[in-house]
Image: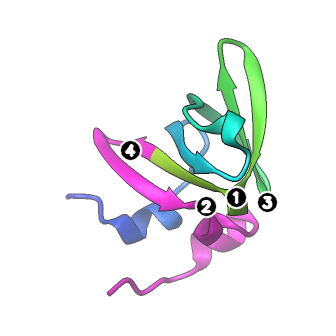
Amino acid sequence: MKIQPADIARSELIGLEVEVLDAENKSLIGLKGLIVDETKNLLSIEKDGVVKKVIKSQVKIKVLLEGQAFQIDGKILVGRPEDRLKKVRRIK
């Protein structure tokens, strides 16, 4: 079954490959790595043993899930991960 963009917002993000496409803090653009932790407002991204924390509401990311790449505005990821997993979102 093909993954839909709406499914990403409800998916578990820890363990996925990610790349920061745009950010208010321009030094984060281009950051690639694995998501190792997630809180209400932060994503922790590990690359080469170094963990960087990025504020969800200030970034746009590309996530790889099952061979598919998805672009996500971090603003839709804000919230506790366990609550976000329960939400049903309508995408037109």
The residue at the point 68 percent across, 41 percent down is 26
The residue at the point 79 percent across, 54 percent down is 39
Q: Can residue 16 be seen at all in this image of the molecule?
A: no
Residue 41's tag is: 3
Residue 37's tag is: none
- At label 2, the amino acid type is Gly
> Could you tell which of marks 3 and 1 lies nearer the N-terminus?
3
Q: Name the residue carrying label 1.
A: 58
Q: Residues within 10 Å of mark 4 (few under 14, many from 20)?
A: some
Residue 74's tag is: 2
- Mark 2 in CB contact with mark 1 (< 8 angstroms): yes
How far is the residue under mark 4 from the one under mark 2? Answer: 16 Å
- Asked where in the image residue 52 lies, by quadrant, the reply is top right
> Could you tell which of marks 2 and 3 lies nearer the N-terminus?
3
- Asked where in the image residue 41 lies, by quadrant, the reply is bottom right
Of badges 4 and 3, nearer the viewer stands 3
